[in-house]
Amino acid sequence: MSNNIDPALIYETLKAVQAGIAGLNDRLDHLTLRLSSLETKVVALERAMVDNHGDIVALHARLDSIERRLTRIERRLDLAEEPTRHE
């Protein structure tokens, strides 16, 4: 093993490694920001889906109420057909 290693070569190599690590850190920061933005958008979409689901449930409840009222009206006016019995 020789001790003839040039310190300038070691210094330049370490500078290149340090520059590479700095570049990776910058890319990691950028990706972290993008991921955070995506997470925010996913949460907003989930909230919108929950709101839509609530609206759909409310519409189903209104339709059920209207159907019950219509059935009562048909019975009062003798418009409802008698259910057929299967014997």
Image (cartoon, grey):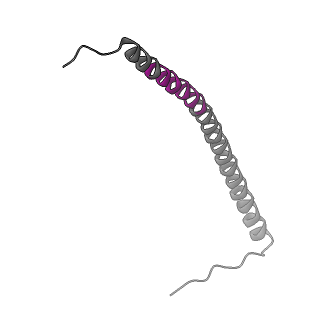
Residue extending furthest left?
A: 1
Magenta segment, principal secondary structure?
helix
Front residue of 43/17: it is: 17
> Image point 36% across, 12% down: which residue?
7
Q: Height in image: 45 above or below 23?
A: below
Q: Height in image: 83 above or below 35?
A: below
Q: Is residue 29 left or right of residue 9?
A: right
> Image point 77% across, 70% down: which residue?
74
The x and y percentages for residue 85 are: 57, 83
Q: Is residue 56 left or right of residue 11?
A: right
Does the segment drawn in magenta span residue 87?
A: no
Q: Height in image: 87 above or below 50?
A: below
Q: Is residue 2 left or right of residue 70?
A: left
Front residue of 54/76: it is: 54
Q: Where, quadrant-wise, is the N terminus in this rendering? A: top left
Does the segment drawn in magenta span residue 29?
A: yes
Task: Tell me which corner region of the image, top left, top right, bottom left or bottom right, holds residue 42.
Answer: top right
The x and y percentages for residue 8 are: 41, 13
Magenta-highlighted residues: 17-34
The x and y percentages for residue 41 are: 64, 37
> Image point 43% across, 22% down: which residue?
17
Q: Height in image: 49 above or below 71?
A: above
> Image point 48% across, 25% down: which residue?
20
